[in-house]
Amino acid sequence: MRIHALHKLYDLRLSRSTRPFLARGGNITRCIHCMLLPYLCICGLKKTVQTNSAFLLLMYDDEILKPSNTGRLIADLIPDTFAYIWSRTEPHSEMLALLNNPQWQPMVIFPEEYCQIERVISDQTQINSDKKPLFILLDGSWAQAKKMFRKSPYLDNFPVLSFSPENISRYLLRKAVKENQLATAEVASLALEFIGEFKNAQQLNLFFEVFRENYMLGKQRKQLPNDASYYQLKNSN
């Protein structure tokens, strides 16, 4: 199994902890890679895809430690996925170098109502065809994401890609502030659709559905039903 940026960031953040992380369900034994209960592990289903894009997850402090985080699902499928802990005053030098790398066109995914209209990308033609899109996801609670957006001056000059999905999020693992607030993996699938990678978006959506189902089954200590998304994804591989 491929060890990616989010696995490494998890280990780094855990090594810096001075006390145990007390997330709900934190005392349960889990697979250290997919964060599901061992009998519901989905690591065997992971398969990277070919894509013309990359993702940068800017994570709020202990977000990487939460078992319910879906950002790792993006890294499981998208080879060029980068992840860093957010800092307002001391952004990671490696991240800044990535943002300045001429091969990428960075763009922040965030609701357009929170930025100047001239920053908003409304059409795929606004993406530079000579560069690969680097989608920046602010990963945390809604309040934390807004804080990161407001207080990250190193992101201020990048365009903003905004989505207004009609469907309510399927993410039921945490209570959302807004009814249509999406999980990180759901947002990433919309970004893939935006650049025309519909098959990759579908694969990520299905992987997200498997994770969501298995996480909920684990909370309820239930077994996997025969018609679960797990088997759809397994058959697709």
Image (spheres, grey):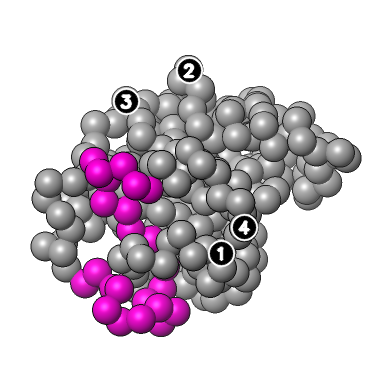
Relative image position of residue 122 (x, y in whole percent): 21, 72
Q: Which x, y percent locates residue 173? A: 62, 55
Q: Nearer the viewer, mark 1 or mark 2?
A: 1
Residue 237 disc label: 3
Report the span colored magenta. Answer: 99-122
Quarter of the view holding residue 155: bottom left
Inter-mark Cα distance, 3 to 1: 37 Å
Would residue 116 be counted in the magenta stretch?
yes
Residue identifier under label 4: 89
Q: Amino acid at mark 3?
A: Asn
> Residue 196: in sight, yes or no?
yes
Q: Is residue 4 magenta?
A: no
- Residue labelled with disc 1: 148
Circle nearer the viewer, 3 or 4: 4
Which residue occupies 38% across, 61% down?
Answer: 108
Q: Are marks 2 and 4 in contact (CB under 8 Å)?
A: no
Amino acid at dot 1: Met
Mark 2 to mark 4 CA distance (whole Å): 35 Å
Mark 3 → mark 4, Cα distance in angstroms: 43 Å
